[in-house]
């Protein structure tokens, strides 16, 4: 092996290893946040279903979508990060709307069970998504095509 080729290999390997480690860590963090978002919505869905059926159904759908998207994020499915961002942001906006102006036939409070945790998890995923989008210079967070 020539000197310059060996030098490139030795320099590229750690950077590639670090990048893979950071990417894998970000995937696990993102998927973990989506799983937690789903768990909160699943736990609260029966209570909210009894208060307003459509809200309970939306909680079940949010749980299913968050878990499916979490799998997609871990597997590196194209667009999974964007879908996760939309799910988390949508849940965040819905919670803020239900607390401030209310939803049709339903209002909520930040003192409701797990409201603060829900805000933290959803805001956390949106924050991770935005940081990664800025770092990778792409809103979709898909691997670059060569």
Image (spheres, rainbow, N blue to C red):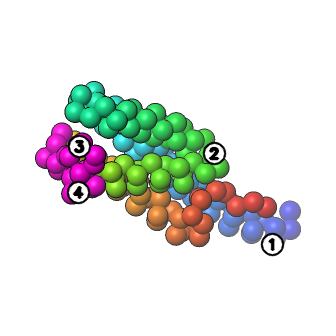
Residue for badge 3: 106
Residue 118 % position (x, y): 28, 46
- Kind of element beneath mark 3: loop
Q: Which circle's residue, 2 or 1, is located before the other in the chain? A: 1
Residue 3 visible in this rendered orientation of the protein: yes
Q: Which circle's residue, 3 or 4, is located before the other in the chain? A: 4
Residue 49, by quadrant, is top left
Q: Are marks 2 and 4 in contact (CB under 8 Å)?
A: no
Residue at 40% across, 45% down:
33
Q: Which circle's residue, 2 or 4, is located before the other in the chain? A: 2
Distance between the Cα atoms at labels 2 and 4?
Answer: 36 Å
Distance between the Cα atoms at labels 3 and 2?
Answer: 36 Å
**Circle number at residue 101:** 4
Of 124 and 11, the residue lying toward us: 124
Front of the two marks 2 and 1: 2
Residue for badge 2: 77
Residue 15 % position (x, y): 62, 63
């Amino acid at each position: 092996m020539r000197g310059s080729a060996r030098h490139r290999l030795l320099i590229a390997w750690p950077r590639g290893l670090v990048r893979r480690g950071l990417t894998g860590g970000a995937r696990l963090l993102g998927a973990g946040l989506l799983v937690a978002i789903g768990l909160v919505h699943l736990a609260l869905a029966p209570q909210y279903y009894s208060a307003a059926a459509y809200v309970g159904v939306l909680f079940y759908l949010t749980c299913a979508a968050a878990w499916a998207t979490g799998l997609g994020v871990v597997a590196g499915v194209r667009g999974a990060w964007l879908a996760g961002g939309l799910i988390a942001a949508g849940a965040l906006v819905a919670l803020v709307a239900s607390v401030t102006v209310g939803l049709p036939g339903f209002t909520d409070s930040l003192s409701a069970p797990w409201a603060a945790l829900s805000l933290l998890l959803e805001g956390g995923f949106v924050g991770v998504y935005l940081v990664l989008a800025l770092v990778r210079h792409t809103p979709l967070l898909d691997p670059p095509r060569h």
